[in-house]
Image (cartoon, rainbow, N blue to C red):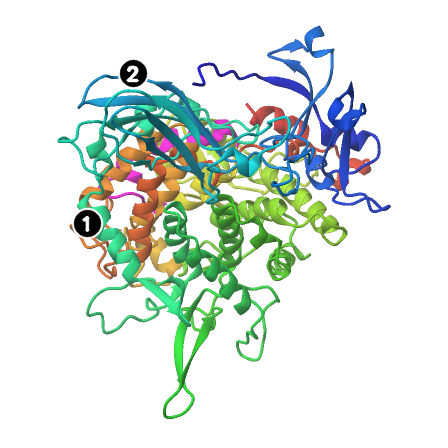
Amino acid sequence: MISKQSSAIWGGAKLADVLELVGIPKSTSAMSAGGKHVEFVSIDRCKEEKGGPYKASIPLSQATNPEADVLLAYEMNGKTLNRDRDHRILLLPRDSSCKKDYKMFPPLVNTRRPQMDFPVQSAICSLEDVNVRSGKITIKGYAVSGGGRGIERVDISIDGDINSNTDIVAKAVDTAANVQPEKVEDIWNLRGVLNTSWHRENHRYHLTFYRYHLTYSSRLYIAYAPLGVDDVDEKTPVVVEKKDESVDRDGEESRLNNVPNENLVSLDPTDRKESEAEKEAWRLLKEAVVTYCGSPVGTLAANEPGDKTPLNYDQVFIRDFIPSALAFLLRGEGEIVRNFLLHTLQLQSWEKTVDCYSPGQGLMPASFKIRVIPLDDTKVEEVLDPDFGESAIGRVAPVDSGLWWIILLRAYTKITGDYAMQERVDVQTGIKLILNLCLSDGFDMFPSLLVTDGSCMIDRRMGIHGHPLEIQSLFYSALRCAREMLASDEGSKNLVRTINNRLSALSFHIREYYWIDMKKINEIYRYKTEEYSTEAINKFNIYPEQIPHWLMDWIPEEGGYMIGNLQPAHMDFRFFTLGNIWSIVSSLTTPKQNNSILNLIESKWDDLIGNMPVKICYPALEYEEWRIITGSDPKNTPWSYHNGGSWPVLLWQFTLACIKMGRIELARKAVNLAESRLYADHWPEYYDTRNGKFIGKQSRLYQTWTIAGFLTSKMLLENPEKASLLFWEEDYELLEICVCALTKTGRAKCSRGAAKSQILV
């Protein structure tokens, strides 16, 4: 029985920083002389090495990766390592075994490659002795895996005579489908390190014990296993209780530790049964799956029975598929997502022409459709028919498609552990093409991405042309994703440097100029205009008269948000939900700003959530403003569709942001509200009116991303530790990067330092 467990807080220096001091740059995968590993040699001598020192090595790419958190530890729990540790420095790679495989095996055991990643394992720490024929037995233990992978399940079963002498066995499976090995013989080594075989504990009482699966991902688990022959069958659920859940997010700050255990997983097994709404949602999602040459490649935008005029709702949209992809991934079904990523990547290279003009290389399609082409009287061929915007309303290229594709690729590799996918040459090329398109030099003076109206989820004229927040937050997220996934080689070095510079400039720009709260409004209210100076306070020449009357009364004392758009002499003060949510998810905003955004949503719940979450923007354009800005769009009438309509698909993104910030109660409240209506209303695309009371006048029913967004929200609430694979924490190194050219001239001093001290509270 494992009766004692310990943990420690280690302190030291990052190996990447130490190596950089001796001339080895960060994110290096190979030296000029060809070296690809860093070797560590101990002072101690050991018999296994014939009197030589202990030795171990890790890849150079891991050692120099600042995000890998390889630590040269010289402190434990705040104290310098003492004499029983010989004042030594310990090498502690995050989620890595760091154990040398000495390859001293008996003749029957084959040698194998060194174990560079911590393997999946579980152990029984407490087994309650019970001498009864019915009731339950309590088993407590832990399960863990390395490489950032979570635990998919823990299986508890028996081995032996159930009437006398029984072994109770624990086996874990991680989210990458790695399985704990059954026998120690399979992983034997001389020193017995990393013995991660099934853990067995002997139980000598008469009992009837069935195999159960702990289907809730956790590092710590408690299984209440029924014992009576007459009381249970193999379908009886096991109650899983999480204890002191602590999610290690690569050394980053996570607020999951602040969430009460009872909010993570309910202890009542009946709560784990799918509701009727969930059952129907899964059935509808699977019915919406589109296949290409026999393989699933996506989901239809909508699958309303009897719809004779589907328009383009019978296509697979990149942005629409994101919640479907996450729902499948969180359920352990990664094939459809992998196929989608690879097939849309192939479409990236297709020739795209509108009126004899072709957009830049790297553009991803908005959608695609499967067409059946007859070859002869007996044979047909399936082909992918993409739409890059040439068939869209307004003929607008989908700027967000490529950004969503990169974000989904990272989510796929994080959840499945299939990192080989992102290392493929075609995938690396696809990432670079998208980035080159977004990072190309232009006339603009700002780090934000310049786009036209209708280039994102709001794909109709709504006055968001310029630098809309939605695009900037997705752009920032995609840059952070790409920086993680790009291969560490000479060909990517300049691109990574460009990404870092853009991330730094973009985060500063958005935090400084897009943020609005009571204090900022008062500053704008007192702005001076026409300031011809590099030291101007009112850098964008915003006229105070632009502050709308509704905002003065609407903004709460304790909340704030990112405005919808910023251009010279123009601030769009509307609240756009997707942009603000993804600012939280990606840490484009500061931790303080993140909480302020959620405070505002909570304070203005009736306006932004109302009867159906979540309002796409607030407030709606009305009267003459609606006529001028939308061009009298009959679909974007006030409080409908993109003009203040309520979109259930935003629910999963709101849930993700709430989980990140430890505000899970807000997400649960919104999900419960949506579940009570969506099922009865047949899963509408959007809702109308100021408070979302009515199904949208032109809303499609059985909208797939409504269905998938609901399912993803439910699964994130059920397994909030999975959410940590989908969001980012603050990257403090970015805040130190500044490429401001003004610092090299006598004209002005860079304002980053002063602004940083004000914002990063």
Q: Give the x, y percent position of residue 313.
A: 33, 66
Which residue is farthest right? Answer: 33
Residue 744 at least partly seen = yes
Q: CA distance from mark 2 to mark 1?
A: 46 Å
- Above or below, 701 against 160 in this view is below
Q: Which of labels 2 and 1 is toward the front?
A: 2
SS category of the residue bearing label 2: loop
Q: Is residue 592 magenta?
A: yes
Q: Give the x, y percent position of residue 618.
A: 35, 44
Report the magenta residues as a range: 590-618
Task: State the image quarter where residue 10 is shown.
Answer: top right
Task: State the image quarter where residue 531 is shown.
Answer: top right
- Above or below, 372 against 741 in this view is below
Residue matched to label 1: 679
Q: Nearer the viewer, residue 520 or 38?
A: 38
Left-right relation of 587 to 692: right
**Mark 2, residues whose alpha carbon is within 10 Å: few (<14), some, or many (≥20)?**
few
Disc nearer the start of the sequence (2/1): 2
Could you tell me which quadrant the C terminus lies in?
top right
The answer to whether mark 2 and mark 1 are in CB contact below 8 A is no
Q: Say the numbered circle drawn on residue 129.
A: 2
Name the residue type under label 1. Tyr
Left-right relation of 211 to 35: left
Name the residue type under label 2. Asp
Instruction: Name the residue rendered at 57%, 34% in the picture.
Output: 118
Q: Give the x, y percent position of residue 688.
A: 24, 51
Q: Give the x, y percent position of residue 634.
A: 29, 63
